[in-house]
Image (cartoon, rainbow, N blue to C red):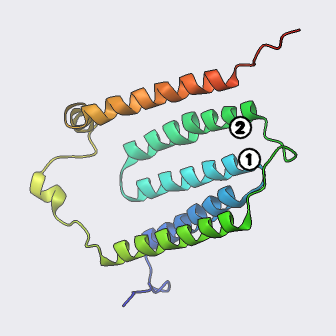
Amino acid sequence: MIHIPDFAHASTVQITFCFLAFITVITAFLAIFSRNPIHSALYLVISFFSIAGHYLLLNSQFLAIVHVIVYSGAIMILFLFTIMLMNLNKENEVHKPRITRLGAIVSFCLICIVLILVFINSKPIAGEYIATGEDYQSIKVLGRVLLNEYMVPFEFASILLLTAMIGVVLLSKKEKTEK
């Protein structure tokens, strides 16, 4: 049975969470369904800021600031530059067939159902912080974990970003026309 919270007795944190969740979902849908790519990028920035608000609700200030700097700052600037380099025009845009749109909607709905079922059936992790005694908000602990236990994925991410930058440069180069 799904428990629907009673907003008359809800705390400020619950109301803030619901407000941020509403903003996140609405701006994510607007980013997907907006026809203008610049508007989609701006909606995505608003969604990123609301996700940073979720991190603040979880008392993870460092992660919230890094999220704002990395995603809302660097990644979205990269997206905007890519959109500008591609010079997307409606005349050149290929229209998707209806079966493709239907397939996207069905797969989206199935993913949503699976995620909702996972969230409903999952149990919260209680006592993890008390059991280990480590402060996961500490930058020292975060750096030690990132550069010891997760060194290989960290380096793979840097190689992936380097490859993406090289690909953007190669795609943006103009071909020489012979006269």
Between the C-alphas of marks 1 and 2, the distance is 7 Å
Amino acid carrying label 1: it is: Pro
User: Measured from the top left, where is residue 77 in percent x and y?
Assistant: 63, 34
The residue at the point 47 percent across, 43 percent down is 67
Check disc 1: other Cα within 10 Å, few if <14, some if 14-19, many if 20+: some
Does residue 172 appear left or right of residue 55 in this picture?
right
Q: Nearer the viewer, residue 55 or 175?
A: 175
Q: Residues within 10 Å of mark 2 (few under 14, many from 20)?
A: some
Q: Disc 2 designates what residue?
A: 83
Q: Secondary structure at mark 2?
A: helix
* x and y percentages locating residue 138 in the rendered image: 26, 40
Q: Secondary structure at mark 1?
A: helix
Residue 37 marker: 1
Instruction: Assess whether mark 2 and mark 1 are in contact (beta carbons under 8 angstroms).
Output: yes
Residue type of the residue flagged with mark 2: Ile
Q: Is residue 152 above or below residue 117?
A: above
The structure residue drawn at horizontal position 25% and vertical position 73%, both measured from the top left corner, is 123
Q: Position of residue 131 (x, y in %)?
A: 10, 57
**Residue beneath the point at 70% across and 51% down:** 40
